Image (cartoon, helix red, strand yellow):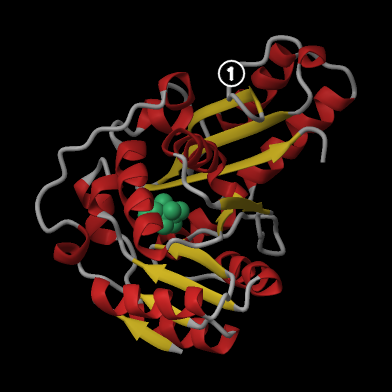
Amino acid sequence: MLILRKISELRKFVEKQKADKKKVGFVPTMGALHRGHLSLISECKKNNPVTIASIFVNPQQFNDLSDYKKYPRTESADLKLFKEKGCTAVFCPDEKTIYPEPPLLKFSFGTLEQVMEGAHRPGHFNGVALVVSKLFNLVTPDTAYFGQKDLQQFLIIKKMVSDLGFNIKLNCCPIIRDKDGLALSSRNVLLSNDERKAAPELYKGLCNARNLLMKGQSISQAKKTVQGIFRNHSFIRLQYFEIADHKTLAEVKNLNDHENVALCIAAFLGKVRLIDNVFLKM
Ligand code: PAF
């Protein structure tokens, strides 16, 4: 497995693959790998003879400096895992390589970013779009792979790809969960024992609401039930629970008006912020 740190090395490697007419799949990450990331690599390898991953903790997408500082950085363990999984190459740039100067470009995603993560993390999706567009320009993959856990991120990247005319297919891969239901996240390692024990309640809350909706309860009743579960919880502070159209993220008022809907949750466990979602129709 090649470890590429410079843009010139990456470009040379990609040019060779294209000259050899090999399809290139791309899995961008911020490292601190878990089985969720590795499932993206497996999916990528199924359809591409060349799998490029990247590791870059992107400062531009952190609206909270302490979150950026404490984000787990485990590069040598990550490289080992990528190698075991059969990645062809990993791009590991430093900050100056990606941002030789502070970027001035600003993205705007309208209503798609005015809810949920976008509403609670100002500037987050601008930072995501900056880095992903840059990585797409450098890697020029045929297909890129992202996780459904970051559903809003996926929809925003999809819009960016369409608006900017990138010739890249996008693949949204299922959420990978621990046995107790907790969605895998690089931030899970930051949870205390008590927080980790409480964390699966986010998924349980989502499943509970989905069951209620499937049994015909109203949207406001399902929302009240989930909000009730977390009211006065010792370890979980609910930030939002939304029932949104799975493509536009518009608030759902009547289930019959939508092909599918996503139930999305964000909560703080101590200082750790976790998100999760489920679709109503699986
Ligand atoms: O989902 C992530 O890990 C990041 O947001 C991404 C897509 C690698 C961009 O930094």
Q: In this orientation, which residue lies closer to the viewer: 159 or 231?
A: 159
Quadrant in the rendering for residue 49: bottom right
Residue with the most extreme right position? 215
Q: In this orientation, which residue lies closer to the viewer: 127 or 279?
A: 127
Residue with the most extreme front position? 19
Quadrant in the rendering for residue 155: top right
Position of residue 133 measured from the top left corner of the image (x, y, whole percent): 36, 49
Position of residue 80 measured from the top left corner of the image (x, y, whole percent): 46, 88
Position of residue 1 measured from the top left corner of the image (x, y, whole percent): 46, 89
Whether residue 65 is visible, yes or no, is yes
Q: In this orientation, which residue lies closer to the viewer: 186 or 1?
A: 1
In the rendered view, tell whether residue 133 sits above or below residue 75.
Answer: above
255 left or right of 33?
right
- Residue wearing tag 1: 250
Ligand 1 under 8 Å from disc 1 Cβ = no
Position of residue 85 measured from the top left corner of the image (x, y, whole percent): 59, 83
Q: Quadrant of the C terminus?
A: top right
- x 69%, y 12%: residue: 220
- x 54%, y 75%: residue: 51
- x 34%, y 34%: residue: 121
- Give the number of callouts: 1
- x 63%, y 29%: residue: 247
Q: In this orientation, which residue lies closer to the viewer: 102 or 65?
A: 102
Residue with the most extreme left position? 101
160 left or right of 253?
left
In the rendered view, tell whether residue 129 sits above or below residue 23.
Answer: above
Indicate which quadrant contains ligand 1: bottom left
**Looking at the picture, which amino acid does disc 1 mark?**
Ala
Quadrant in the rendering for residue 55: bottom left
Mark 1 nearby-residue class (10 Å; few <14, some 14–19, many ≥20): some
Whether residue 32 is visible, yes or no, is no
Give SS at disc 1: loop
